[in-house]
């Protein structure tokens, strides 16, 4: 990718992706799109690691000033070596526990005991849906809520769209495991710092939510296995307790896998799981067994074994449970 191509990519990010979400990243992207020296630093990243959210997270991890304009520009140009070193081997590993606001109702309909396995688990924060509290707020102001009997340090708030309240009860999870190319350890300070750096500046409450969820995971770490899910899932599932129902989730991971590998992973999941729960854009695969036409452009389909149960925000910020969902 040439400097001109970097600048085109960052100009698109500045105008189409960052506005309304992070004013700081919007300003950084505008600078990268217009300053040849900054773009030249970014162009040194490996092609698969030049996306703005990843590069900006690496810069924050390396100590970038949380300001825009000349101070940030000069820091980037003067710290190119440190930035590139900090980005070595990095990938976007967004571990958003709020996704559980979508996953939890799907899990609530499954009789346990459940052995819960996530592909693309990062630090495993979506393996603890039974340890978080939930608040689903309808446009009328009415609230549907659920919390563990002993409470939780994490409350996940989601907008409830439509007229149907999804099923809310504690899934009986007795075992947790995650698969990731590069799993992160909730007990490790460096891994925790990387997950915090991946939060876009301006996303109110998100870093605090992730930090609290990391504490929950650190107190009772799941089994985390490094590898390609299609290659290691069978061995991971073999470790589950006898008699437990194998439930595999794939929220947010399939877009990062090329089509052929994605199809192979789905085939393996269907082979080894009793239940497969996924949250995906309808066009990502063809494994749906019911229609996805009620999923809006800004939503993903939440499904169990290919049966669409709801439309939901990709990060769990809203859910619209279908009135005829077959749970």
Image: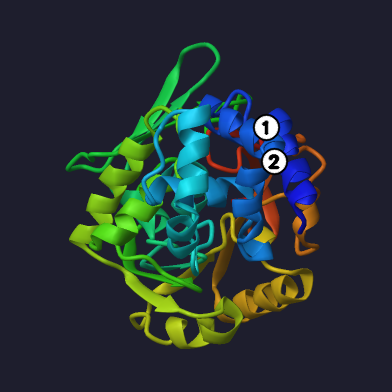
Residue at the location (79% across, 50% down)?
A: 5
Q: Which residue is mark 2?
A: 10
Which of the pair 108/91 is nearer the observer?
91
Q: Residues within 10 Å of mark 2 (few under 14, many from 20)?
A: many
Look at the image and name its color scheme.
rainbow
- How far apart marks 1 and 2 lie (CA) works out to 6 Å
Q: Position of residue 320 (x, y in %)?
A: 62, 33
Badges 1 and 2: C-beta atoms under 8 Å apart?
Answer: yes
- Tell whether 123 sits left or right of 102: left
> How far from the left and from the top, in percent, is residue 306?
70, 60
Measuring 53% from the left and 33% from the top, which residue is drawn there?
317
Q: Secondary structure at mark 1?
A: helix
Q: Secondary structure at mark 2?
A: helix
Q: Residue at x 55, y 52 (%)?
A: 54
Q: Does residue 18 lie above or below 80 as drawn?
A: above
Q: Judge whether 278 appears above or below 69 on screen.
A: below
**Quarter of the image containing the N terminus?**
bottom right
- Residue 222 image offset from top left, x and y in percent: 31, 68
Residue 14 is marked as: 1
Residue depicted at 58% across the width and 65% down the height: 276
């Amino acid at each position: 990718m040439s400097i001109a191509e970097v600048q085109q990519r960052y100009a698109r990010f500045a105008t189409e992706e960052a506005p309304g979400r992070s004013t700081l990243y919007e300003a950084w992207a505008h600078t990268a799109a217009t300053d040849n020296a900054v773009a030249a630093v970014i162009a040194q990243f490996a092609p698969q690691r030049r996306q703005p959210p990843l590069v900006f997270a690496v810069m924050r991890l390396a100590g970038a000033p949380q300001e825009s304009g000349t101070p940030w520009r000069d820091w980037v140009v003067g710290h190119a070596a440190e930035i590139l070193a900090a980005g070595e081997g990095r990938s976007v590993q967004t571990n958003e526990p709020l996704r559980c606001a979508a996953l939890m109702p799907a899990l609530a309909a499954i009789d346990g005991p459940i052995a819960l396995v996530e592909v693309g688990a990062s630090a495993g924060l979506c393996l603890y849906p039974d340890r978080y509290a939930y608040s689903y707020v309808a446009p009328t102001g009415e609230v549907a809520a659920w919390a563990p009997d002993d409470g939780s340090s994490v409350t996940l708030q989601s907008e409830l769209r439509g007229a149907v309240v999804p099923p809310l009860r504690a899934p009986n999870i007795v075992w947790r495991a995650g698969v990731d190319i590069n799993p992160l350890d909730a007990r490790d300070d460096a891994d925790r710092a990387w997950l915090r750096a991946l939060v876009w500046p301006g996303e109110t409450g998100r870093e605090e939510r992730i930090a609290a969820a990391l504490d929950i995971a650190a107190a009772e770490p799941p089994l985390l296995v490094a590898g390609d899910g299609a290659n290691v899932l069978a061995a991971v599932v073999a470790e589950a307790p006898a008699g437990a129902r194998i439930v595999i989730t794939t929220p947010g991971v399939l877009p990062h896998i090329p089509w052929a590998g994605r199809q192979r992973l789905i085939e393996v999941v269907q082979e080894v799981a009793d239940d497969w729960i996924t949250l995906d854009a309808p066009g990502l695969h063809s494994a749906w067994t019911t229609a996805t036409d009620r999923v809006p452009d800004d939503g993903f389909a939440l499904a169990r074994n290919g049966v669409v149960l709801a439309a939901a925000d990709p990060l769990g910020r809203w859910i619209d449970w279908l009135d005829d969902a077959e749970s």
